[in-house]
Amino acid sequence: MTATPPPTDAEQLLRLEHQVCFALHNASRAFGAIYRDALKDLGLTYPQYLAMLALWEHGELSVKRLGELLRLDSGTLSPLLKRLESAGLVRRERSAQDERSVLVSATAAGAALREQATQVPLEVAHRTGFAVEEMRELRGLLGRLTDRLDAAAGVPGAAQEC
């Protein structure tokens, strides 16, 4: 019987469990499952929740600015906003100053949903099992990673500290 030789460094680099991108992908899918459960009583999907978070934080936004904040293109954002509008949570209207621009704002029902939503981050944080400080550290690392990847990809407005 012949022993299997140990893997080379090049082989190690290509192992699935060594890929940061795969670890992030798995974490994202796991978060998705937790958010699906946490958001079911609000009747929101995770992308809809993010849109509502942005509107609660910033107030009325142009569709363009909302897309920038959420890193979503108009092909993804428009149907999402249409569903939120059909649910009575947001209102879309053309800007009086620039007819090419569409403004989005939370309706009274959308604003009222904010109170219920305050429990979502607490539930998600609890379900991670991480301490508050660990969550802050993770958020900081992920923010730095995103900035560096954006800069490396040449994303306009990305931090150039690489």
Image (spheres, rainbow, N blue to C red):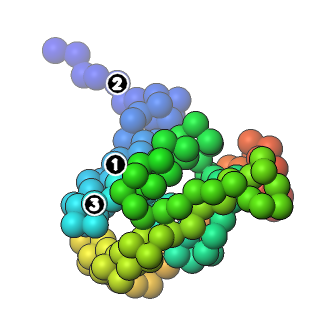
Q: Quadrant of residue 55?
A: bottom right
Is mark 3 in CB contact (under 8 Å) with mark 1? no
Numbered mark located on residue 43 in the image? 3
Q: Residue at x 74, y 59 (%)?
A: 95
Callout 1: SS:
helix
Query: Image check: 68 left or right of 125?
Result: right
Instruction: Pick the residue in front: 35 or 7.
Output: 35
Vertical arrangement, residue 86 with respect to residue 54, above or below: above
Q: Name the residue under label 2.
A: 5
Q: Which amino acid is tagged 3?
A: Gly
The amino acid on which the numbered mark 2 sits, given as a three-letter code, is Pro
Quadrant in which the N terminus is drawn: top left
Residue 149 at x, y percent in the picture: 68, 50
Residue 140's image quarter?
Answer: bottom right
* Residue at 50% across, 51% down: 81
Q: Specify which label sits upstream in the sequence, 2 or 1.
A: 2
Q: Of helix, strand and loop, which one carries label 3?
A: loop
Q: How far apart, in angstroms, are the residues tagged by discs 2 and 3?
A: 54 Å
User: Is residue 69 depicted above or below 125 in this figure?
Assistant: above
| Label 1 sits on residue | 29
Q: In which quarter of the image is the C terminus?
A: bottom right
